[in-house]
Amino acid sequence: MRTARVALMLLAGLFVSCGTHQQSAIDPAGPQSENIAGLWWFFFWTLTSIFLAVMVFMLWTLTRRHRGIEQEPLEIRHAPSPETESRINRTVAGCTIATVVILFVLLIASVGTGKSVSELANKNNGLTVDVTGNEWWWHIRYQNSDASMVFDTANEIHIPVGRPVQIRGMSQDVIHSFWVPNLHGKRDLIPSHVTTEWIQADRPGIYRGQCAEFCGLQHAHMSVYVIAEPESKFQDWYNAQLEPAASPSTPVTQHGQQVFLNNACIFCHQIRGTTAGGQNGPDLTHFGSRMGIAANTVPNTKGNLGGWILDPQSMKPGNHMATIALPSTDLQPLIEYLESLK
Ligand code: CUA
């Protein structure tokens, strides 16, 4: 009973929404996941029907009264009559043919889904996003043929509703897997190899994604949000991201900027418009506009940010963020400055 309940909960966990944001493979929000969910349900109902048919047949044979065999002479009890023999042969042949046909139908359905999923590539309209897996965060780069229009962000991908977006997956270290269940299936991110897929969201929403390939200690804390919004809202976000970071406008945030630029932060983080140009960690140019910290391990609030800067190892053990001892007179302004980077 206990085992059954745990199994049910695990199964439910695979499909139901996670937290306040959606993460469900059977609640498709775009053509790719619709195709995949369709295939999933087709398999589910086909195989469930077969399972039920087998169970019903088994129960029928178990409850059926023995007829004939008990009355037959002892020496032929284990040698069925020619009529029974041919009936058994016909049944076995029929079931074998049915199995082969069903397997072929499932195969054709799978290939058909693969073909439908690849069709979105033909509708590509130039929006390309590079997603690079890192231990344990996502580097996001919006590509453009004009180099001045290329920008970086982290752990959050904004896309316009109704437009196909090309995702080019890469990895900086080990194999990760990019998976946003409401939008598409899993795609491995492999070092020194680019994998390509297309996603499209047909309704606005915040879709949670998760690294789906075990990649080390903090694999579970490697999530990404895909934020699908109407075209005009997306354009506003896009144009804001192209801008360099806002200059600090108050004495406190000015102090905070100095703390950032005079500490080891600059070795890993970039803030466009300042001298901080580190490339090992997430770009912080518009950090204040993002939803989460540490690959969405915690929501982006001043309290969480303070905890993260002071002791990143207790929040996410094993991560590559350096611990920098800061007096509270420096920590508070630094938090104010980073949160002001909208
Ligand atoms: Cu990255 Cu698991």
Image (cartoon, rainbow, N blue to C red):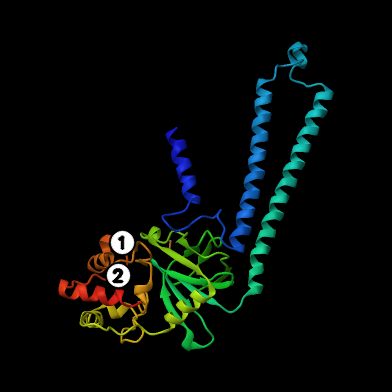
Give the number of the disc on residue 86. none
Q: Earlier along the polypeptide chain: callout 1 or callout 2?
A: 1
Residue 170 in view in this figure = no
Q: Residues within 10 Å of mark 1 (few under 14, many from 20)?
A: some
Q: Which disc is residue 321 wearing?
A: 2
Instruction: Please indicate, yes or no, whether residue 77 appears anywhere in the rendered image.
Output: yes
Residue 316, disc: 1
- Name the quadrant where ligand 1 sits: bottom left
Identified by mark 1, the residue type is: Lys
Left or right of 287 in this view: 33: right
- Taking depth in this image into account, of 65 and 15 the one nearest to the observer is 15
Indicate the position of residue 249 as horizontal and vertical percent values: 27, 84
> Where is residue 74 drawn, in percent x and y?
74, 12
Q: In the figure, residue 25 lies in which quadrant?
A: bottom right
Find residue 324 and report its horizontal and vertical position in percent. Answer: 22, 72
Above or below residue 34? Residue 190 is below
- Compared across the picture, whether 130 is left or right of 42 comes to left
Left or right: residue 154 versus residue 201 is left
Residue at image location 58% in from the left, 79% down from the top: 126
Residue occupying image coordinates x 67% and y 44%: 46
> Which secondary structure, mark 1?
loop
Q: The residue under label 2 is which amino acid type?
A: Met
Q: What is the C-alpha distance between the residues marked 1 and 2?
A: 9 Å
